[in-house]
């Protein structure tokens, strides 16, 4: 997951390949709570690992549920309709509406001394209609802040079950879902009726709830969309084992990707047209706009059809979350797109009508908005503007606007706070980059060259982490190549030159900070040894190996960008890099750094000898016939003799930001 302050997406040209989606947030949190309310044990497979599910799991542990997680499989030992603790419990719900609303209802019916809080935005998300319905039932709920909003304090109920329970349906379907999941706890000796006041929005999410309730032994009688009856004698029964479908809302970004991007199309694994999730109907909307979609059991395949896409008018009540993706698809259409019946957007993680309108305008689009509608006009070639997209701590805003990087004007897009996607799809950007294609020269590279012990590796890895870019420690490649050759039973002599070169081209090497991983195994200590250096010297004189490693270094230029450090990154390997830094420090300072490094690892060292060795190595590197150590003509020089690593990182970031179109 990208934990950077922002993520710059270079111009993207096409996409093809396969994406396997994470589990559905809506199904995951429903299944977790239902499993907790059962007697016995439920094994949940393919559970989404996200901020929202972590919030729910933490709450269940606080209640006394048994929770055992093994990867995406979680075993829940339920409460059997009782909570195990009688002490006061305070729950922190973050910004997880799929946890806050149903837990409020379940805890209110169970009774106890509970406080539910969240982030500031959660305290702005309305919950009054659910609280009103629960109070009609006899639940004891107090507001601790503004009336109608969390935080809440829950006490012991005095249940009144002889009259229908009214709940508004036109603000959030989560209110009805919460009641449907909580009221079976009170329906042991009589039926309970829920009456929906007003038009029920997001009906497909209620269908998910009803489907899952049936899996857990609760057969709700539905009379249209206005009246729901929970039969007397209802008791939760564990299904034993249950699998979570992949998230159909998350599928919308890759369905849109297949419709927008040139290429062989996108295959999505984990969800198909027979999904129980209402957002699978996003496929119909995408098809209306021109996408070509085929599907099978648990998979979808999408490719570009009509181009430009077709502007549409759509009532989005049935796909409230996925419909956000249509707003960005509309930028690629042949005429305006009108999204109607989206009032629920205003009470989500942010006011999504305002957010989507504001960010589309940043890109250059004309957008009109109303209380429950949004009209987006397309952006033809020549009118796209570089934009830094504010994401409002809203995962769907971040994922939607990543699709703007496929714009006709080949302009990059900045996504602020990309880690917000952790709410439902922590690896979203990794999944996007696994199928998206860009012109190689559009993928940014920052080169940091310099003499031995100048600190270029530390600086490069820190800047890479800040930007979310890949990192290449070129100086380690000969060491890793020699190590891999010896592991493969090769000699480090000319007789095995061809075989070593073949191995080097496909070397499965990866750099994480100071760690060097070969095929996922940490080989840092092995290659950094004195013997590792001697072995590197042997393979470095083999011309075929040197050529192979140039190819390998070029292969590190992958989305979203690369930080490369070495001695000839800016002069030989990436001469067209948009930023080249030549890092220097005086020999005395470098010797002192190397001395401290060796002492910390338990090696004895003489600082004068180290300085002499560094000066001799500088002379050799600068006078060698192949790729001598020297700054590239357009390199910026940075002397870090008296700078902290933090100051050096800040300087490189300032230089980099000054070269971006975002200002």
Image (tube, grey):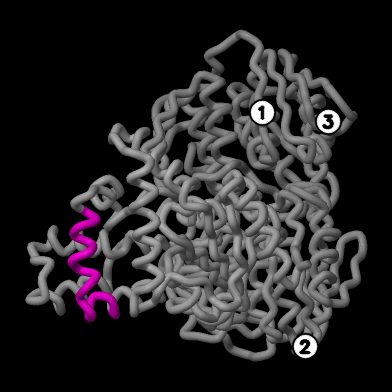
Residue 330 falls within the magenta-colored stretch: no
Q: Residue at x 48, y 60 (%)?
A: 21
Residue 560 shows up from this direction = no
Q: Residue at x 62, y 26 (%)?
A: 187
**Discs 3, 2 touching: Cβ within 8 Å:** no
Quadrant in which the C terminus is drawn: bottom right
Q: Which residues are magenta?
A: 532-547
Q: In terms of secondary structure, where does tag 3 sit? A: helix
Distance from the alpha carbon under mark 2 to that under mark 1: 46 Å
Q: Which residue is mark 1?
A: 92
Distance from the alpha carbon under mark 1 to that under mark 3: 22 Å
Neighbour tally class for label 1: few under 14, some 14-19, many 20 plus, Cα within 10 Å: some
Neighbour tally class for label 3: few under 14, some 14-19, many 20 plus, Cα within 10 Å: some
Residue 623 shows up from this direction = yes
Taking depth in this image into account, of 330 and 177 the one nearest to the observer is: 330
Give x and y (percent) for residue 477: 31, 64
Query: What is the number of callouts on the image?
Result: 3
């Amino acid at each position: 997951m990208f934990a950077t302050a922002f993520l710059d997406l270079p111009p993207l040209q096409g996409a093809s390949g396969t994406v396997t989606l994470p589990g559905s947030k809506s199904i995951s949190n429903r299944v977790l709570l239902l499993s907790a309310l059962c007697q016995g044990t439920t094994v949940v497979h393919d559970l989404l690992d996200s901020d929202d599910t972590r919030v729910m799991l933490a709450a269940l542990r606080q209640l006394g549920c048994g929770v055992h997680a093994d990867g995406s499989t979680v075993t829940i030992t339920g409460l059997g309709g009782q909570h195990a603790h009688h002490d006061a419990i305070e729950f922190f719900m973050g910004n997880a509406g799929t946890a806050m609303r149903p837990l409020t209802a379940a805890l209110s019916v169970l009774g106890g001394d509970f406080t539910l809080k969240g982030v500031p935005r959660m305290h702005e998300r309305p919950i009054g209609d659910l609280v009103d319905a629960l109070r009609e039932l006899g639940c004891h709920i107090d507001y601790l802040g503004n009336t109608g909003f969390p935080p809440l304090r829950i006490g012991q109920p005095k249940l009144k079950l002889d009259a229908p329970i009214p709940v508004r349906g036109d603000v959030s379907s989560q209110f009805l879902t919460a009641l449907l999941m909580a009221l079976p706890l009170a329906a042991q000796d009589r039926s309970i009726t829920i009456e929906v006041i007003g038009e029920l929005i997001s009906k497909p999410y209620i269908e998910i709830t009803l489907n899952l309730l049936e899996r857990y032994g609760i057969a709700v009688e539905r009379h249209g969309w206005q009246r729901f009856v929970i039969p007397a004698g209802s008791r939760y029964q564990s299904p034993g084992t249950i699998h979570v479908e992949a998230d159909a809302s998350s599928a919308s970004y890759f369905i849109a990707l297949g419709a927008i991007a040139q290429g062989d199309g996108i295959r999505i694994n984990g969800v198909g047209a027979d999904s129980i999730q209402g957002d699978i109907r996003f496929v119909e909307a995408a098809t209306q706009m021109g996408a070509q979609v085929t599907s099978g059991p648990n998979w979808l395949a999408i490719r570009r059809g009509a181009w430009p896409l077709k502007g549409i008018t759509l009532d989005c009540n049935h796909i409230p979350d996925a419909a956000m993706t249509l707003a960005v698809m509309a930028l690629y259409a042949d005429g305006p797109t009108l999204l109607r019946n989206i009032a629920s957007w205003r009470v989500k993680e942010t006011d999504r009508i305002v957010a989507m309108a504001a960010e589309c305008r940043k890109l250059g689009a004309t957008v009109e908005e109303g209380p429950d509608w949004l009209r987006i006009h397309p952006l033809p070639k020549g009118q796209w503007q570089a934009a830094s997209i504010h994401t409002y701590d809203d995962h769907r805003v971040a994922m939607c606007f990543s699709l703007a990087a496929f714009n006709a004007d080949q302009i990059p897009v900045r996504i602020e706070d990309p880690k917000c996607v952790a709410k439902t799809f922590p690896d979203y950007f990794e999944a996007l980059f696994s199928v998206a294609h860009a012109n190689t020269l559009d993928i940014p590279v920052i080169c940091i060259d310099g003499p031995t012990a100048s600190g270029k590796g530390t600086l490069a890895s820190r800047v890479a982490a800040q930007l979310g870019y890949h990192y290449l420690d070129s100086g380690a490649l000969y060491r890793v190549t020699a190590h891999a050759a010896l592991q493969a039973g090769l000699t480090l002599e000319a007789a095995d030159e061809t075989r070593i070169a073949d191995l080097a081209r496909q070397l499965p090497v990866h750099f994480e900070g100071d760690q060097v991983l070969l095929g996922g195994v940490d080989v840092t200590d092995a290659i950094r040894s004195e013997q590792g250096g001697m072995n590197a010297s042997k393979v470095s004189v083999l011309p075929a190996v040197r050529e192979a490693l140039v190819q390998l270094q070029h292969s590190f230029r992958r989305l979203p960008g690369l930080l490369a450090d070495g001695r000839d990154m800016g002069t030989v390997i990436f001469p067209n890099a948009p930023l080249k830094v030549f890092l220097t420090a005086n020999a005395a300072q470098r010797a002192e750094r190397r001395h401290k490094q060796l002492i910390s690892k338990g090696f004895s060292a003489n600082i004068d000898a180290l300085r002499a060795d560094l000066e001799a190595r500088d002379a050799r590197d600068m006078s060698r016939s192949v790729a001598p150590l020297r700054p590239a003509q357009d390199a910026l020089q940075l002397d870090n003799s008296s700078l902290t690593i933090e100051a050096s990182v800040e300087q490189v970031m300032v230089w980099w930001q000054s070269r971006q179109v975002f200002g």
